[in-house]
Image (spheres, rainbow, N blue to C red):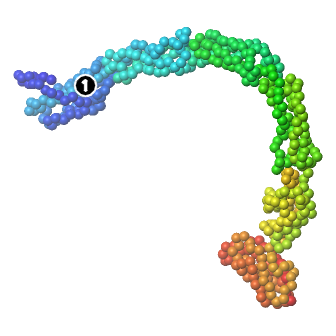
Amino acid sequence: MRLLAGSAVVAVALATSAAAQSAGGVSITPSCDGVANGCSTGWYKSSVTVSFSVSGSNLKGVDCPDRTISSDTAGTDVSCVVTLTDNSITGLVVTIKRDATPPSITAIAAARPPDVNGWYNHALGVAASGTDATSGIASCTSVTYGGPDSATASVSGTCTDNAGNVSAAKTITFPYDATPPAVSPAPARSADANGWYNHPVSVAFQGSDGVSGLDSCTSGDYSGPDNAAAAVTGTCRDKAGNTGTASFALQYDSTPPTVDGAAADRPPDRNGWYNRPVTVTYTGSDATSGIGACDSVTYGKPDDPTASVSGRCEDKAGNKSAAAPFSFRYDSSPPKLAKLTAASSGGAVTLAWSAAADVASLKVERRAGDGAPVTLYSGKRIERFVDTKARDGSRYAYSVVAADAAGNATTEKVVGTPSAALVAPRASAHVRTGTTLRWRPAPRATYYNVQLWRNGTKVLTTWPLHPVLPLPRLRPGRYLWLVWPGYGARAAHRYGALLGKSTFVVG
C-alpha cells in the first residue's frame, strides 16, 4: 500500500489476518458483524460488516473505516492503517469471501443408455453436474438406482458450491424393470394314470409382468425316456429384457416291477424279540411307475421263537410276485413273579419273592405316601432285597417289576414298615445287672438327650455325644428309656423330635 506522508509517498506493508495484531505498542482487533476476532477466512453466504478496534499510547492517526461486504466476491480486502507518533505506519488487512448465490445445476444424466427397448433392467448410475461463478462447485449428486421397478422411475439431484449454497433440484425420469416375469407351465392334457404320463405331452408356458409387460414365451414337448423325475423347461421374456424360467415336472413310464422283500412296521421291541402284534409289509421296486400294492400281514400269536408270515406284491400292471417269508421271534407273555413278602427287622425292610427262570432283569421301587417312586435296585434277576435306607416307623409301598428278554413285565406290590430307631436292648428285653443303650444316629445331631425311668420314676438324664450309652449297674426293676437328638451347642437347648422310646427289665 502507498500513502502520502507530508510531501513524500510512503510504501506500507500491512499484515493480513482475521485475528488481532500488535506492533509498535499498538493493538488492532478486527470484528465481523460485531464479533471481535470473529472474521472467517472461509466463505460467507450473507452480507458481513467489518470493523476495527485500535488501542495504544503512541497513536497519531487512525484510518480504519467500517465496511459492509454485500456483494458476491472471491476476495475483498478491508484495511486498517494506523500512524504512530514517530510517523511510522502499521496496519491490518482482513480479506472477506462472500457467495450468497446458489450454483446452477446444468444436467442430471444416466451413466449408460437403456438396456432393452428403452428400459433399464439392472442398477443404473445417475450423476448431476453444475457451475458456480464465485466459490466454485464442491459436489453434485451421484447415486446408483436399483429399484423399485417403475415405468416412471426418477432420481433427483443437486449441486453444492464451496460456500455451502445448494442448487435447485433437477430430476431425471426413466423406465426401470429389473424383475423377471412370473412364469407357469400349462400342459396340454392331464396325466394318463395315477399321475403318470404314458405318451408324449406338449407343455406351453405362460407368464405375466406387472411393469414393462410380457414380450414372449416358449413351449416344449416330452416323449421319453422313461423317468420318474422328468421335466419340461420353458421361459418368458418381458419388454425390459428380463427372462423368467419355470419347469413342469412329470412322471413318464411304461415297464413292469420287481419284488424286493418284506419289513416289519418297527424294530424288535426288546433284544430281538417282538412282544406285541407286529405288521409286516411287503415291498417291491419298479424301474418306472413302481409297485401298485403289496400285502400287509399282522402277527399276534402264538408265542414262537421261530414265528413267520408270508406275503406278496402286485405292480400297477396287475402282476403278482411269489410269496415271500418273513421270520422273527415273538413272545407276548409276561414272566411269572410270585410270593412277594416284606419283613421288617433291625431298622430295615427285607423283600423276598419267587421269580421265573425267564426273568432277564428286575427293578425294585419304593414309594412313600403320595411321593414319587424311588428306584432302589435295577439289574439282573434276584429274589431278595434289603432296604436299609427307609425311615424308621414310616410306611412304604414297594413294587417289584420283573421283565423277560422280550420286554414283557410283571409287577407285584407289598407294604413294609422299617423298625424303630432304638436298636438295643430290644423292647421288653430282660438283662441281669446292666446293659448298653444303642440307637440309630440322627442326621446333623451334635449330641443326644437320654432319659431313664425306673418303675415310673426318672432316675437319669444325660447328654451323650454319640448314639451309645453304657449302663453297667442298674437296680432291679422295669425301665423306660427315651432319646431326643440335640443340635448345635448344648446350652441352646435345641432338640428335635423324639427318636423313640422302649423298655427293658433288670433282674
Crowding near pointer 1: few (<14 within 10 Å), some, many (20+)? Answer: some
Displayed quadrant of residue 60: top left
Q: Residue furthest front?
A: 322
Residue at the spot x=69%, y=12% of the render? 219
Res. 455 in view: no
User: In what quadrant of the picture does the C terminus appear?
Assistant: bottom right
The image quadrant that residue 363 belongs to is bottom right
Q: Is residue 401 above or below residue 449?
A: above
Q: Position of residue 405 (x, y in %)?
A: 85, 53
Give the residue displayed 59% in from the left and 15% down from the top.
242
Label 1 secondary element: strand
Q: Number of labelled discs?
A: 1
- Residue at x 80%, y 27% (from the top left corner): 286
Q: Residue 426 appears at what percent x and percent y?
A: 84, 79
The reply, left or right, for residue 242 in relation to residue 398 is left
Question: x, y (%) of residue 272?
Answer: 83, 48
Q: Name the foreground residue: 236 vs 174.
A: 236
Locate the N terminus by quadrant. Answer: top left
Q: Is residue 291 in sight in this rendering?
A: yes
Q: Residue furthest right?
A: 302
The amino acid at mark 1 is Thr
Q: Nearer the viewer, residue 273 or 242?
A: 273
- Relative to residue 214, is residue 476 drawn left or right? right
Give me the residue at 80% from left, 59% from top: 379
Q: Which residue is mark 1?
A: 95
Q: Position of residue 366 (x, y in %)?
A: 82, 61
- The image quadrant that residue 464 belongs to is bottom right
Farthest-out residue, left: 7
